[in-house]
Amino acid sequence: MVVVNKILVVLDVYNDYRDDPAHQPAEIKKALALITDRRKAELFLLGCGFEEFLHDSYSIFSEEAAEQRKVFCREMERRLQVFVDTLNTQGIKTDYRVHWTYPRYEQIAKEARELDVDLVIQHINLRSAHQRHNLSHDSWQLIKTCRQPLLLIKDNEWPEVPVVLAAVDPAHSHHKPGGLDFNILNTAIETSNALGGRLHVLHAYSGSARAFADAESIRNAHSEALDGLLANYAIAADDIHLIDETPVNAILQSQQALQASIVVIGALSRSRIAEAIIGNTANKLLDYVKSDLYIIRP
């Protein structure tokens, strides 16, 4: 069973949430929805700020800059305190941490590791009116360095019955018991259960790239591998998808066709799906997929 009780929520401290104290950012809303046991829940709100003009290397007035940094951090603390007070009143144990730091991803990964959280939630900003999202260098590095599960969220609210899509790769050795594919499946199942959603499983094998191999034999081999992976899971046949396509295209097509709210995917070296995340073609997936991305490490 995948337990999500301790969550690190990264908030944009450049937003003054006090303007609308009744409003909860999407990061907090989604964190609360995913908690396994509210009695054991712990939220850590993390704010990381940096202004170049206040950095010592930028200004010769180091003492003045240091004092202004303290003022800046106190302001960030006040902005997060709004939610700490509200959530604690609701019975959710909540604390905040504020840092003057750059690059931000290093501090996020460090906090996640030291707190040993079950999940890290971070927002991906909207890049344009065409629903393209910006996976910044900061987010790229966080994917690579954060060892805890990472949920990259968009602005979309989850519907009443959200679809959770698990992208697996059972033809590779990491699908062994206790391995990445089982972690992906278990996470997707628990997420779907927590949200009252519906689970779908996708495996893309890109057999068409092997021009001189027998297409039917390739499909049968991947079908057997997928059946073996899912042997102990009660998943309806209609909710299992085996697609002859590259992982990036298969995920994009399936997410759109199923209107999936969350795609659960793995990050592992030598995995075709990991290459889709960290490789050169990743912009096609992470910039244009309209769902939230739940990234699992081994």
Image: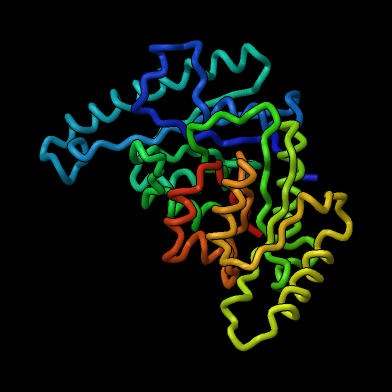
In the image, residue 240 lies at what x, y percent? 76, 55
Q: Nearer the viewer, residue 280 or 117?
A: 280
Above or below 193: residue 140: below
Say which residue appears at 18% left-offset and 37% top-offset.
Answer: 53
Above or below 96: residue 253: below
Numbered marks: total: 0
Determine which quarter of the picture holds residue 284. bottom left
In the image, residue 207 lies at what x, y percent? 63, 75
Colour scheme of this structure image? Answer: rainbow
Say which residue appears at 63% left-offset and 29% top-offset.
Answer: 159
Q: Is residue 51 visible?
A: yes
Tell whether 95 sits left or right of 213.
left
Determine which quarter of the picture holds residue 86. top right
In the image, residue 237 lies at what x, y percent? 82, 53
Say which residue appears at 57% left-offset and 46% top-offset.
Answer: 256
Q: Quadrant of the C terminus?
A: bottom right
Above or below 20: residue 97: below
In the image, residue 125 lies at what x, y percent? 40, 38
Above or below 147: residue 43: above
Q: Nearer the viewer, residue 274 or 105?
A: 274
Q: Quadrant of the N terminus?
A: top right
Q: Is residue 149 visible?
A: no
Q: Nearer the viewer, residue 33 or 251?
A: 251
Q: Residue furthest bottom?
A: 212
